[in-house]
Image: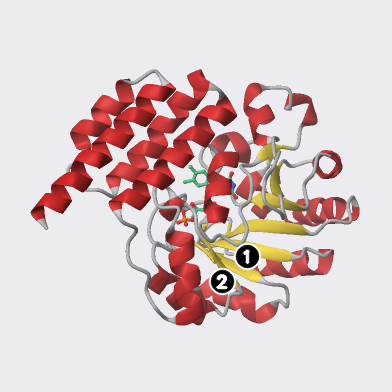
Amino acid sequence: MAGVTDRPFRQLCRQLGAGLAVSEMVTSDTRLWGSRKSRFRLDHCGEMAPVSVQIAGGDPEMMAEATRENVRRGAQIIDINMGCPAKKVCKKAAGSGLLRDEKLVADILQAVVQSTSVPVTLKIRTGWCPDFRNGTTIAKMAEDAGIAALAVHGRTRACGYRGEAEFDTIADIVSRVKIPVFANGDITSADRAREVLDYTGAAAVMIGRAAQGRPWIFREIAHFLATGERLPEPTLDEVRKILLTHLGELHRFYGELMGVRIARKHVGWYLKTLANSESFRKTFFQIENAEVQNASVHEWFERRITRGAQAA
Ligand SMILES: Cc1cc2nc3c(=O)[nH]c(=O)nc-3n(C[C@H](O)[C@H](O)[C@H](O)COP(=O)(O)O)c2cc1C
């Protein structure tokens, strides 16, 4: 997820049980890779293998070039974005905007797969709009082109993020292709993951927003799928440890000025899951310094842990 799954967050998700974590999308226009945003997105130093990098664009030759260049920089999997509905991406005939031009989809898939020996995966939606749900056609084209695995978000491009994800199209895709399919959309718990896998027959589930502020969702799902047992919620002490590790990595990765700003939204997501955190959230958002951010999180949890111990 652009703006969310940066290297520190991916690393944390992998440590907490995610089998694979794909980079934020990077433009296929390599001329733009000098921008600050792209430089951070292209940094995979020390990342757990396999390093999967998502590229977005609408020109087959540029997508092939971006593939070669990313592989040269350490990508072990290239993921093609045909799932993003953002206007900025769609207007340039990229992301899910491509889904209505099947000839161009075929050309991009072929160009990217043929440009590299690393596996190429594809992320799509179920189609362009509810009346043109061509996800199955695209999936078959992907298989024929040599795509190694396919992630499908159970909404059309026109649906944006509205309504509920639907899994009938994903089940249809699974029944018609042999490559692994990852089902995606609104999966927020281990139980829901199990239901979606059973309903669609997909090889895996992919989690987006439910991991924001809850990166341990991956171990909850992995454990439940492997054993049928539900893991207990992490204790406050463990949430604090995870959050402080996350903050430290953000500060290190982006530097203090940018790291402090990016940390705010993540802390907001973590605290959303905890009752009576609104006033601390407001205070936290004013902090401009990494050390003070760490200390304030530490103390806030400390007070809650102590109160909990006294009440017990
Ligand atoms: C803030 C945000 C950024 C996203 N960026 C990307 C992206 O760069 N590439 C991509 O394939 N999907 C992107 N997505 C879509 C998610 O990967 C996912 O398909 C969608 O959120 C549905 O899954 P979920 O309900 O588990 O979040 C993004 C979603 C959000 C909310």
- The C terminus, quarter of image: bottom left
| Frontmost residue, 215 versus 239 | 239
The part of the image, by quadrant, that contains residue 34 is top right
Which x, y percent locates residue 81?
A: 66, 49
Is 84 on the left or on the right of 30, as rendered? left
Contact? badges 1 and 2 (CB < 8 Å): yes
Above-or-below relation of 257 to 146? above
Which x, y percent locates residue 13?
A: 53, 52
| Frontmost residue, 255 versus 173 | 255
| Residue positioned 47% across, 49% down in the render | 160
Q: Earlier in the sequence, mark 1 or mark 2?
A: 1
| Residue positioned 58% across, 47% down in the render | 11
Q: Nearer the viewer, mark 1 or mark 2?
A: 2
| Frontmost residue, 119 versus 183 | 119
Is 206 on the left or on the right of 304, as rendered? right
Count of marks placed on residues: 2
Residue 92 visible in rendering: no
Which x, y percent locates residue 2?
A: 56, 40
Q: Amino acid at mark 2?
A: Ile
Q: Which mark is residue 135?
A: 1
Identify the colour scheme used. secondary structure
The part of the image, by quadrant, that contains residue 190 is bottom left
Mark 2 element type: helix
Mark 2 nearby-residue class (10 Å; few <14, some 14–19, many ≥20):
many
Residue behind mark 2 = 170
